[in-house]
Amino acid sequence: MSELSANEAISITVEARAHGWRIDHYLARLYPNYSRSAFQKAITQEAVLLNGLPAKTGRRLRVNDTLSVKLPKESDSSLPAEDIPLDVLYEDDSLVVLNKAAGMIVHPGRGNYHGTMAGALQFHFDQLSDMAGQLRPGIVHRLDRDTTGVIIVAKDNQIHSRLSSQFEKREVIKEYHALVWGSPDFESDLIETHVSVHPGKREKMQVCQPGGNSREATTWYEIIKRFKKATYMKLLPKTGRTHQLRVHMNHLGHPILADALYRGQSKVTEADLNPDHPAPDDSPVLIQRQALHARRLTFRHPQSGKEMTIEAPLPADMQATLDYLESLAH
């Protein structure tokens, strides 16, 4: 791929796969070191010509269109598009619902600029909302880095606003599945606390007394199945505080398996779940991140108003851990 420079224009003939794409999206995929906003700015400055005439940002490409592109040599500091696979659970003209993988950061922050879901969205989708800012294209809500499961992405600002309103009004039903240590006292219960940033470790949250910078946090839980050393649970957060489910389960004395931040244990092996394991020092690792998965999301479609429920299957590591617990129960 030719490098863009300030002193030369690159001529591009549009291939069949890009038919119907927006110009800025197409160029951002060809030159991933530049953001779509950089190309949008170039189009505004008439630095992009389409068939010899100044291009328009919203113009859709046709096969064999000719583009002439001139940009500064320095790469744009905005979010680059990255060719990272995404697991699409549902898509239409208004939104996309993804099954987020473990280890994927939703958007850049704290030095994590590359390998994000936001960068992957820039690469794979032609149109995304921008009302959450340049570094959060289409992103309506978020999941922790090592939490897997359902997450919604908006394709335009009107859709984004309507979805955000549902989250703010607590109309969205969020169902998580988790594996926790021990066995909670009740089959189901409501956890109501206040939470705040931990004073000694800014990356952590803590349960605290009301007042100051604390915020209320409410979670409903139900037991799915109890095992000897762990419990499989359904968690339904009514509020959406940072690390809420991890903090609440830790507060109950039943932290989530392999939660390094709140349990201090970054992996769980077969021997951890089976005291009678024949080779405890050489025991296979079952899971190496918190065993928490956003299983289902129920919301009203922002265009049709129809209620939708999108479900993500349990990831392989949680399923393997659950299968091992089941094997010990027989």
Image (cartoon, rainbow, N blue to C red):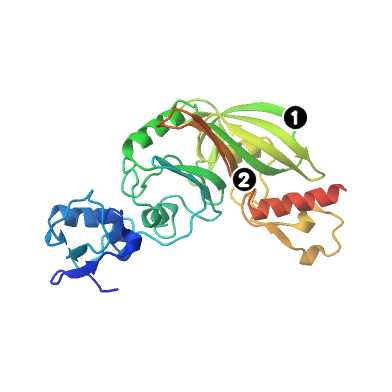
Residue at left offset 41%, top offset 50%: 107
Where is residue 61, by image quadrant? bottom left
Residue 298: % across, % down: 54, 33
Contact between marks 1 and 2 (CB within 8 A): the answer is no
SS at mark 1?
loop
SS at mark 2?
strand
**How far is disc 1 from disc 2 in space, using C-alphas?**
19 Å
Would you place residue 74 above or below residue 289 in this image? below
Residue 207 shows in the view: yes
Q: Nearer the viewer, residue 220 or 124?
A: 124
Residue 153 is labelled as none
Judge the density around disc 1: few (<14), some (14-19), many (≥20) Cα neighbours within 10 Å.
few
Residue 187 is labelled as 1
State left or right for residue 291 relative to residue 33: right
Residue at left offset 41%, top offset 32%: 302
Where is residue 168, by image quadrant? top left
Residue 271: % across, % down: 79, 58
State left or right for residue 124 relative to residue 37: right
Would you place residue 97 above or below residue 36 in this image? above
Residue at left offset 37%, top offset 43%: 155
State left or right for residue 224 relative to residue 110: right
Decide which of tag 1 and tag 2 comes sooner along the chain.
1
The residue type indicated by label 1 comes to Glu
Residue 247 shows in the view: no
Residue 27: % across, % down: 27, 61
Q: Mark 2 sits on what residue? A: 292
Q: Nearer the viewer, residue 12 or 124?
A: 12
On-image quarter of the N terminus: bottom left
